[in-house]
Amino acid sequence: MFLLHPVYIVSSSAVGGHEEMSSPFSSHFDFFHEKDTFGENTFEKAEGELSRIAFNFLLNKTSMSPTDIDLLISGDLQNQCVASSYGLYTFGIPYLPLYGACSTCTEGLLVASLYLQSIENNAPHYVGVVTTSHNSAAERQFRTPLEYGAERSPTAQWTATAGGAFLLTQKTSDMLPSPDAPYRVRIVYGRAGKVIDGAIADASNMGAAMAPAARDSIRHFFQNTQFDIRDIDAIVTGDLGKIGSALLLDLLKEDNLDIIDIHHDCGICLYDEAKQDAHAGASGCGCSASLLSAMVLPRMLCGQWKRVLFLSTGALMSPSSVQQGISIFGIAPMVLLESEKQI
Amino acid sequence: MFLLHPVYIVSSSAVGGHEEMSSPFSSHFDFFHEKDTFGENTFEKAEGELSRIAFNFLLNKTSMSPTDIDLLISGDLQNQCVASSYGLYTFGIPYLPLYGACSTCTEGLLVASLYLQSIENNAPHYVGVVTTSHNSAAERQFRTPLEYGAERSPTAQWTATAGGAFLLTQKTSDMLPSPDAPYRVRIVYGRAGKVIDGAIADASNMGAAMAPAARDSIRHFFQNTQFDIRDIDAIVTGDLGKIGSALLLDLLKEDNLDIIDIHHDCGICLYDEAKQDAHAGASGCGCSASLLSAMVLPRMLCGQWKRVLFLSTGALMSPSSVQQGISIFGIAPMVLLESEKQI
C-alpha cells in the first residue's frame, strides 16, 4: 500500500566481518571485524555485538542518544532471534522483535513506516531498524558446524557476517542536513509478502526456494500500482543469489515482466565473484541490510537511482522442518524507495 | 502510546489440546484435539494445524474469506516460527511474521493496531492475529523430549498446547452485529516493552525471568498515563505463573503500585490447580492468546470488565543461549482494552 505520509531514512550503517572486507562495496561499510568474533567468545554472542556496533554507528552519525528513539525493531537468523535481543537490550529502547528470516530488513522498514504513520504531534519521532546475520552461527545452526569441513553444494549460498542499521523519521525537518548528499531517501510504499511454497526442500538451495515469493511480490506491485518497469531505476532483491535470480527473471517473463536491465541481487553483489568463492552468492539478514546501506542508499543519495523497489527475501524453514522433509517456503516483503532533492 | 483511532476486535477463537480440555475456561474454547496431534504425524506440524484451525474458526464465525483480510500477523515458539508459516500459508494472505516468544499475542495486536491506523479510506480493512504453542514441540526444542521422562523442576511451567486468533478492524460499522453481547471491545493504547535482564539463567524458571519486564511495562503505564489503579478493572499478564506473579506483585510494591486485587495471570488461570499439576503454571504463546479469547474477552463483552491492561510476557532466550550461560531476558508489550456499549 502507498503510505499516507512518506517516511524518511535519516541515516544508516553497515558492518561486516572478514569476508565482507573484500566486498566491492567495502568502502561504504562503517566497520569490519577481521576475525568475525567481534571480541566475543562465541559466534552467537559475536552477532549480538555486531548488531550493537551497527546501531551505535547510527547513534554516533546522528549525534543521538537512545532516549531520542521511540522504538527499535530488529531480527536475525538465530533461534529465537537472540542475537538481536542480547545485542540491543543495553540501549533500553522499547523493542519490537521480528522473524522474517532473511527478509527481516524490509519487514522492519515496513513496520517502522506503519509506526511512524500512527503519530500526529509536533515532537520528533525516530525508529531504529537493525538486522544481522553471522556465517559461523548460521552454518552450525542450520547446516553443520564449520569445523566439520563439510563440502558445500554448488547451489549453496554464503551467509554474510554482516548487518545494517537504519534510522527513520516522519518529517524532513527532523533530519540532519547532509551537506555532502544532494538527495534524501523516503519510503513511499510497502507491502508484506505472501508466503509462497517454492516446492524446494533442499536447505542448500535457498535462492530457488525464495524466487517464487519475489516473483509474487514484484508482479503484485506492477499489477496494482500505476508504475511501469520504465518508472523504476532498480529492483533490488535480497539474497536470491545466482540460481534464484536466474529463476526470478524466468518466472517474471511468464508475467510479461522483463526486469533484467534493472535487477540487482544483494546476494550476487555483496562479494566479488572473481576473487571470492561464495558459490551461488551471499545470503542472510545482514546481506540485504548491509547493501541497502552500502550500495542502494549511496546511489540514491547522489541521484544515480531515483526510484528503487527493494525486497529482501526470506526462506521460512527450520532445521527440524527440513529434516522432516517439508518444503521451504519463501516470503518477500517490499518497499518502494524514492530519492528527493534536498532543498 | 494512545492510538489515534481505537481498533476493534471483531471476533476471536481459542483452540486447545488434551490438557486444555480440563481448563476452567474450556467452555469458551472453540475446539480441542484430545490427542494433541491435530491429525498430523509430528508435533511441529500439529502446531501448524492448530494455528490453521484457530484462524479457520475466525473466518467461519465472521463469514469471511481470506481475500477479505489485508494482513495476517503471526508467531510461535518453534525455531524460525515455522508452525505459523506452515500452518497459515494456504490462506494466501500477506503475512507479517513476529518473534516475541510468549509475548507474541500482544505484540501482534499492537502491530495490527499500527497497520489499521495507517489506512484512510472507506473500504473495510481487517487484520488477523494468530499465536500458538505446543507442549510437545516446545519441550523437545527447549528442554528435553518428553520420551526421556525427565523430572520437571517445581519452578517449571507447562507450555500450553493452545492458540488464539483475533480479527481486528478500524470501524464499528465494519463489525458484525453481536446480538448476544451487549458490549464490544476496542484497543485504545499500546506499547512495545523494553528488554529487561531478569538475571535468571534457568530455563525452568521463566516466570521469574519475565516478571521484571512486566513490572517495567506496568510501571511505565501508570507513570505516563492519567490512569490510576482504580480506573482499571483487571491487569492480565501472560504467563508469569505462580512464581513470576508473586515476584511481580513484590516488585510493583517497590513502585507503590499494589495490583493484587486486580491482577490475573493467564499462566495461573489456564489450568485448574486442584486437578491439574502444571507445577508453577502454564506458559507459551498460546497461553495468553487462548485466554484472551476464552477469559478476558467474554468478561468484557458482557460488561463485567470495562478496562483491562493486557500484557503477554516473553522470555527472549534460545537453547544455545541457555547452554552458553547467558541470562534470560524478558519483554512485556501491552495493550489497553476497553469495552464500549453497542448502540
Image (cartoon, coloured by chain):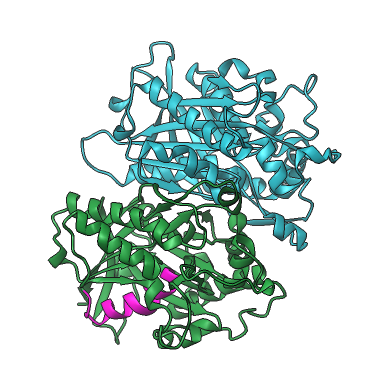
Chain colours: A green, B cyan
Residue A74: x, y in percent? 50, 60
Answer with the quarter of the image where residue A319 lies.
bottom right
The residue at the point 21 percent across, 66 percent down is A259
Residue A212: x percent and y percent? Answer: 34, 54
Q: Nearer the viewer, residue A151 or B143?
A: A151
Instruction: Confirm whether the magenta stretch covers residue A297.
Output: yes
Q: Residue at x 32, y 40 (%)?
A: B70
> Magenta residues?
A287-305
User: From this viewpoint, is residue A44 visible?
Assistant: yes
B175 lies above or below B192:
above
Q: Which percent across, then down, holds residue B136?
A: 69, 37
Q: Is residue B317 found left or right of B246 in the rendered image?
A: left
Which quadrant of the rendered structure holds the C terminus of chain B? top left
Q: Quadrant of residue B241?
A: top right
> Measuring 37% from the left and 22% from the top, which residue is drawn there?
B62
Is residue B211 within the magenta segment? no
Q: A245 or B115, which lies in front?
A: A245
The rendered magenta stretch, by its main secondary structure, is classed as helix
On the rendered structure, is A63 left or right of B326?
left
B299 horizontally vs A126: left or right: right
